[in-house]
Amino acid sequence: GAGVSQSPSNKVTEKGKDVELRCDPISGHTALYWYRQSLGQGLEFLIYFQGNSAPDKSGLPSDRFSAERTGGSVSTLTIQRTQQEDSAVYLCASSRRDRGPYGYTFGSGTRLTVV
Amino acid sequence: GQNIDQPTEMTATEGAIVQINCTYQTSGFNGLFWYQQHAGEAPTFLSYNVLDGLEEKGRFSSFLSRSKGYSYLLLKELQMKDSASYLCAVRGLNTGTASKLTFGTGTRLQVTL
């Protein structure tokens, strides 16, 4: 597609429930990244995909968080047993390559609220 | 690890020039990026520096000094629509950091009349 698409745009869930966040990157972009941004905070790195593999998962805050990417395209971030501290905007970005002058193109994000 | 510092907030007048500074410490360096983020929106790419010097792009310019671990974003002829957060981000060089950007917390710029 023309841009990075994320769904849902907003998600309100009860504490303890599982949620799935979806990211559809720009066609042909091999690198895909997940970040989260809490109110007034900077962007916190979660995980990076090159193709379908994840060479860097160092930012996942706990084993309740997991992500996968299939077909070198769509990625899903899953949060199990959500906690209130998981409330944040989850941003997905893709890049043509993972080095050089290729910056990220971000999606509009999923605003997750855990109540 | 990587550490990036930028001022939290700045205020400037419409039509003026403002300089937003960013300092960084990194175990390896493979490029510095500036992004603009309007409230409630996703960040958008502004500039990229990998060599020392000034990159100019219209009203926006970005400068890099690798030896000093320092960059700045210069905004000229400020407009009200420039009110936004400006994020400095560094790409590392070593395994594990080579591919992702590490972001500063951002500088919130308020442009006033």
Image (cartoon, coloured by chain):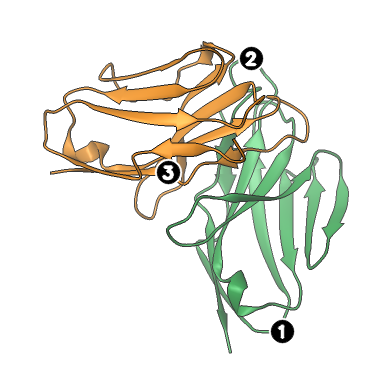
> In the image, is B20 to the left or to the right of A58?
right
- Nearer the observer, disc 1 or disc 3? 3
Q: Is residue B101 above or below residue A11?
A: above
The residue indicated by pointer 1 is: B15
Distance Cα–Cα, label 2 vs label 3 = 28 Å
Horizontal and vertical percent position of residue A42: 46, 47
> In the image, is B103 to the left or to the right of A62?
right
Q: Amino acid at mark 1?
A: Gly
Dividing the picture into quarters, in which one does residue A9 lie?
top left
Q: Residue A109 shows which numbered tag?
A: 3
- Residues at marks 1 and 3 on the same chain: no
Give the position of the N terminus of chain B as an image quadrant. top right
Q: Are marks 1 and 3 in contact (CB under 8 Å)?
A: no
Q: Secondary structure at mark 2?
A: loop
Could you say which is closer to the camera, residue A105 or residue B76?
Answer: A105
Q: Residue at x 58, y 90 (%)?
A: B113
Which chain is mark 2 on?
A: B
Q: Is residue B28 above or below residue B96?
A: below
- Residues at marks 2 and 3 on the same chain: no
> In the image, is A19 to the left or to the right of A96?
left
Q: Amino acid at mark 2?
A: Thr
> In the image, is A31 to the left or to the right of A82?
right
